[in-house]
Amino acid sequence: MISEQSWADARVLWDYHHMHHELRPCSVVIGLGSHDLGVADTAADLYKQGMAPLIVFTGATSPTTRERMPRGEAVHYRERALELGVPASKILVEPNARNTGENIEFSRTLLADRGVDVSSALIASKPYEERRAYATACKLWPEVEFVSASAHVTLAKYVDMILDARLVFDMLVGAQQRLTLYPEQGLMIHQRIPGRVFAAYDRLRDAGFTSRLLPAP
């Protein structure tokens, strides 16, 4: 049973990780691989709204997705987008990336190899990965303007969709830790983290939501 305090703290992190960007047309949609097939839905919806003429799905597999997506995250995302009516010619697949940095770097290389001029990009991610994805992309591809996008759902609704509250809470805590550590390692841009977010993170960590934490240096 997850306590009311932990739910309240998770909502603080959930809200903070949303960038609240206004969607606008961009050169490409980059869908970041994960356990959440809803990212493919978001990318397909952006394409069908006319927000970008092309989608890149990027992602290999991880311990979380190996059983759910045995052909690789990007491949399963492509299959989902095709089901939703996106033409095959409008989807590129990058099947090798194993973390957010590689998602950006390998997508950049793929698009360059295909001769696609990119001045702006919509980054489609899980709702609680918006800020991490944005901070990483801005660091690794600074000449491009990035807009964050994800499914518009509440934390409670998202947990109902994923069917695993502990996994979602663990992921939230892991994402928050990386926002603190990675800028110092040159992997993200720095972003302001309010005190209430630090406090919520500390309480969730102390409550045992730690499976996605990086080991202490």
Image (cartoon, rainbow, N blue to C red):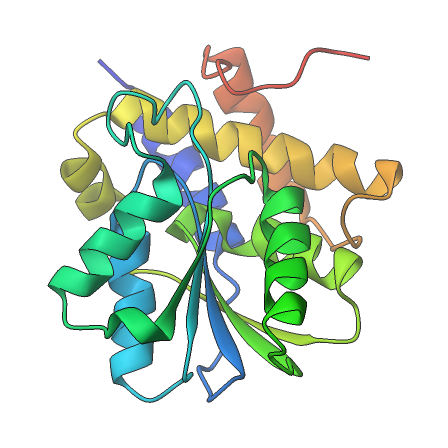
On the image, the x and y values in percent for residue 65 come to: 34, 27
Rendered location of residue 157, percent (x, y): 18, 47
Q: Is residue 65 left or right of residue 33?
A: left
Foreground residue among 31 and 209: 31
Residue drawn at x 87%, y 38% as measured from the top left: 184
Relative to 181, residue 3 above or below: above
Q: Is residue 164 left or right of residue 118?
A: left
Q: Position of residue 198 (x, y in %)?
A: 64, 36
80 and 16: which is toward the camera: 80
Instruction: State which quadrant residue 5 falls in.
Output: top left
Q: What is the x, y in percent for residue 13? A: 49, 43
Eyeballing the image, is 107 above or below 186? below
Instruction: Count the marks.
Output: 0
Instruction: Give the residue displayed 76% in from the left and 49% down from the top.
Output: 188
| Residue at (14% x, 66% y) in the render | 84
Above or below, comparing residue 179 to residue 25 in the picture: above
Q: Quadrant of the C terminus?
A: top right
The answer to whether one can see residue 181 in this image is yes
The residue depicted at 45 percent of the width and 17 percent of the height is 209
Nearest the viewer among 191 and 118 is 118
Splitting the image into 4 quarters, where does residue 182 fall? top right
Q: Nearer the viewer, residue 186 or 18?
A: 186
Residue 5 visible (yes or no): no
Placement of 52 over or under 33, stated as above or below? below
Query: The N terminus appears in which quarter of the rendering?
Result: top left
